[in-house]
Amino acid sequence: MAFPPDACSLIVKYVADSKPTLVSLCTVSRQFQAASERALYNTLQLKGYNLTVTVCNLLARTSRLSGLVVALSVYEDEDDSDDGSGSYSGLEPASMYWEALAGALKSTTRLRFLSFYFTSGQPETAWIFDDCTFQLRTFHCDFVWDRHLQSFLATQSRLSDLYLPDYESLAITPSTSSSSFLPKLSVLECTFSEAAVALVPDRPVCRVKTCFTHSRLEDKRTELDILAASLRQSKKRLRTLDIADSSYDAGFSLELLRRVTDVSLSSELRYIGTLVLPVVGQQLRCIEVDVSEWDPSPTHPAALRALTLELRLYCPTVTSAVFVYDFERHVVKMEGHLAVYDEDASADNIWREV
């Protein structure tokens, strides 16, 4: 007697966290096979040379399975990279790795979320995106900017969330600057402000995370002028802005705050970082400040709660505070009139959420 489809789905959902159980269910019946395969292949996380090549080759030759993949994450395996056993950073097996990825990407037509996590940019490998037909929503891209990557992004009319570790400003072409290039982009994280300058104008970008390229004060002021001008050209009001710096300075933080809180930029601003205390603001909901120079270090939860309450005396609209000490982030959130230290909070993602 066949199970009702809803019953199969409920059983699969109950054991979804157990991959071995899902694999076993695939052998029970065709009904369970279909439901279990959807759960197994909907979200894939691949790490290591052998696993990545094996799964990608399977997807490339089995359209029934590749059509189920909605989210794919590929991680660098440092152990493989270092032991010479055949990772993508080796010599002879590298082509097999990238060809397997290319084949899988061509077959995963329903892919919506794609992430590559490498410790360094991968030069001359973005060709794996050639001839892909999927339309992404989110793309975490650890690839060096080249013509292949640019051509691929030109096809992504629905992409709204983009991470770029590398950007070659000399590669800007009319197609890149056109509003038809990434027309839905709203969240941009990039390690070079030049990428934000090029990609924010004429797009609905409202959340930006980037960093200053220059270290000299005068050069940073010029860079800030250019960045602020580009942010004003976004189709949506800026909601969150996180600009990292190689060295934080209280004087420049105030210049940054004054520039960003210009009416044309700050009317919808809810998050700004990273600044050096003291700062003030009237529109903010979350603020990130650097306290690395404080001695003793204010990293005890009691001290962080006290600092948050003190900060709210000057900026009562703040409901969350992120304190950076030696590049480690500590989050305190207001719950009613209480400041609560949230050790489980993902400080790196707050700028995306407020």
Image: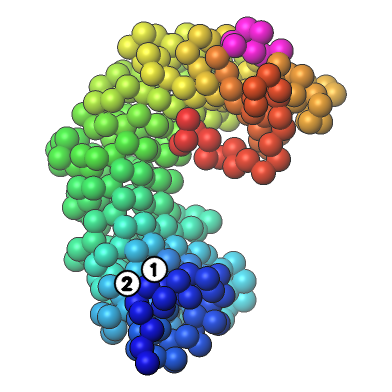
30 or 97, nearer to the observer: 30
267 or 245, nearer to the observer: 267
Q: Position of residue 189 (x, y in %)?
A: 42, 39
Residue shown at 27% from the left, 80% from the top: 64
* Residue 236, visible in the rendered structure: yes
3D distance between C-alphas at marks 1 and 2: 6 Å
Q: Quadrant of residue 170?
A: top left
Quadrant housing the N terminus: bottom left
As drawn, 164 above or below 10: above
Q: Is residue 315 magenta?
A: yes
Q: Is residue 166 left or right of residue 292?
A: left
Q: Is residue 171 magenta?
A: no
62 or 131, nearer to the observer: 62
What amino acid type is highlighted by mark number 2? Leu
Q: Position of residue 154 (x, y in %)?
A: 19, 49
Q: Which residue is mark 1?
A: 42
Residue shown at 49% from the left, 80% from the top: 22
Q: Main secondary structure of the magenta part?
A: helix
Q: Is residue 85 left or right of residue 140?
A: right
Residue shown at 30% from the left, 19% from the top: 232
The answer to whether mark 1 and mark 2 are in CB contact below 8 A is yes
Q: Which residue is mark 2?
A: 68
As drawn, 83 above or below 70: below
| SS at circle 1 | helix
Per the rendered image, the range of residues in magenta is 310-316
Q: Is residue 239 left or right of residue 236?
A: right
What amino acid type is highlighted by mark number 1? Asn
